[in-house]
Image (cartoon, rainbow, N blue to C red):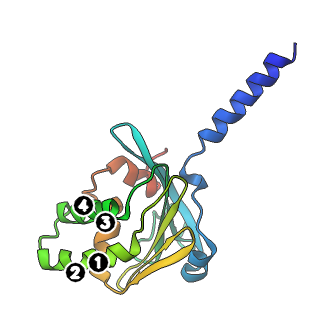
Amino acid sequence: MTCPRVLHALLLASALALAQPAAAVSLPRPVLATAGALQMAGTGEMRWFGLKLYDAALWVDSAQPAGAGPALQKPYALALRYTRAISGEALVTASIEEIRRLGETNEGRLARWKPLLEKALPSVAPGDTLVGLHEPGRGASFWHQGQLTARIDDAELAGAFFGIWLDARTREPRLRARLLGLAQP
């Protein structure tokens, strides 16, 4: 009988499609037009109490030599494709809390950064992608679903924000290692 074989093939194809890693997180055209030539350094996923929140991919300068590790002194992009609906307010609050946890103690600075992050980080639905392009020493730009949400001309805020994922003290060291290409997913 071919029916069980067809069913088995369909189930296998479905499982493979659902198991797509964060590598499927690509950069929208406006980001590529702004950033220039970037290549994927690594991918991973963020889980919270076992629930998958998003897939992540880090894109770095493509001119770097192979095996040199990501050159984070040049512009790079972090793309997050969400699997759950999360309000912009929750994204901003979590970002500020993580930046504080990583060592930013100036509450006045955090208060100034909050409205900038509110512009950059809108509410997301399952399947939505947020991309942040970090330009070290200058600032960052943010896109939601390929549409620019904010340009932030604050190098300290940009560095602190991307540190949530890339700082050695991140709350998610395994995700960091995967994004940086230091570990396999």
Look at the numbered disc 3 and give the secondary structure of its residue.
helix
In the picture of the structure, the residue carrying the numbered disc 3 is: 92
Disc number for residue 33: none
The local crowd at label 4, few if under 14, some if 14 to 19, many if 20 or more residues have their Cα within 10 Å, is some
Disc number for residue 112: 2
Q: Which is nearer the eye, 110 or 36?
A: 110
The local crowd at label 1, few if under 14, some if 14 to 19, many if 20 or more residues have their Cα within 10 Å, is few
Q: Position of residue 63 (x, y in %)?
A: 56, 75
Disc number for residue 98: 4
Amino acid type, mark 4: Glu
Disc number for residue 115: 1
Look at the numbered disc 2 and give the secondary structure of its residue.
helix
Q: Is residue 178 above or below residue 88?
A: above
Q: Is 138 positioned to the left or the right of 64 in the image?
A: left
The local crowd at label 2, few if under 14, some if 14 to 19, many if 20 or more residues have their Cα within 10 Å, is few
Q: Is 106 positioned to the left or the right of 33 in the image?
A: left
Whole-angstrom CA distance, mark 4 to mark 2, is: 16 Å
